Image (cartoon, grey):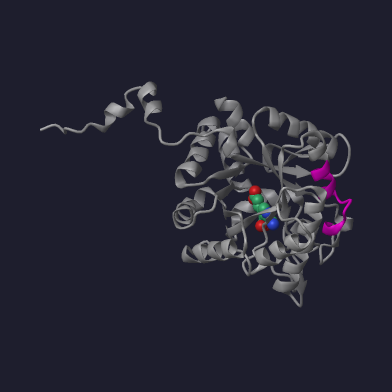
Amino acid sequence: MYPLRRNRRLRTNEAIRSLVRETIITPNDFLVPLFVVEGMGVKEEIASMPNYFRFSLDLLVREVKELWAMGLKSVLLFAKVPDNLKDNKGTEALNANGLMQRAVKAIKDVCPDMLVMTDVALDPYSIYGHDGIIENGIIVNDDTAEFLAEMSISHAEAGADFVAPSDMMDGRISVIREALEDEGFTNTGIMSYSAKYASAFYGPFRDALDSAPVDLVNIPKDKKTYQMDCANRFEALRETEMDIDEGADIVMVKPGMPYLDIVREVKNEFDVPVSVYQVSGEYAMIKAAAEKGWLNHDQTMLESTIAFKRAGADIIASYFAKDVVKLIF
Ligand code: PBG
């Protein structure tokens, strides 16, 4: 007896496969992370992120126009802060004329409809490379949250459409939301990094911003007192629920590929848009294996992207955004 149902019929050729395909990637799915740096005419490749760059503002706006023309309509900004401007409290983050604030304005000047999200966290501004203020070797929660609210106001004043707190302090979403409301930024959204794991996959990003935790006595060597333990699943749901209750418009799971199960659970459990971050280490892995000829670059890139959407992500933050759109459109 042969089977009555032959699933292979639906895989016979590309025409039928595309007819029954459940998941389609479009430029609308992507959020493009961008690294900005001081200077003029700077486009520096990040050593551990081949073909990914830090841009000075003059070249950033060129890049943004190119993204817009490709149908990529949302960016997520990270600023590389000069060492001499770093301190424990992240004071420079509030500078109305700081790099991040100028980057937002520069983008809005050339491309007013581009959705601009800003990273809200202390680490690029911290001499210690941590996402919070440190007192007696401890990352203090509430003072950090207050500071992040001020930082969010500063970004909103510069013209950011969304702020994206990536720090994992408790209660920061409500503090930020309230501050935005008080200052009249009722339409400024919050994309919360709600289930953010303490991950080894962030390495290349910390190279990009020179933001790794420093190796000093009495300074925590890692981010495990605020970012989540990779072994935990229920905790991700608790974190996400809390951020939604506090006013997050969009929630995020990060990293991406090792946490697809969490993406699916969050998507099933909550009714707000879910984003996923395919982080720097995931990008670097594919690039490195492809350089060695061990993996096919385009196919692995596309497969990873489709997997995010299949897992339930509504928004994909990825360093591959441009490459994927070039490949399929
Ligand atoms: C820090 C921050 C990190 C990333 C985004 N925001 C690194 C970290 O938590 O140490 C990582 C992104 C990536 O690896 O691509 N606030």
Q: Quadrant of ligand 1?
A: bottom right
Q: Nearer the viewer, residue 48 or 20?
A: 20
Location of residue 84 in the rendering, given as x and y in whole percent from the top left corner? 89, 57
Determine if residue 219 is in view. Answer: yes
Q: Say if the magenta span includes residue 226.
A: no
Q: Quadrant of the C terminus?
A: top right
Residue at x-position 57% and y-position 61%: 244
Q: Is residue 219 above or below residue 321?
A: below
Foreground of the two, 95 or 33: 95
Q: Is residue 140 visible?
A: no
Q: What residue do we see at 79% from left, 36% from top?
A: 60
Residue 128 drawn at (x, y percent): 77, 64
Query: What are the residue bounds of the magenta stretch?
Result: 93-105
Instruction: Report which quarter residue 51 is drawn in.
Output: top right
Asked if residue 187 lies left or right of residue 274, the reply is right
Give the total number of marks visible in the rendering.
0
Name the image quarter holding the N terminus. top left
Residue 292, given in percent of the width and then of the height, sits at: 57, 34
Q: Nearer the viewer, residue 98 or 229?
A: 98
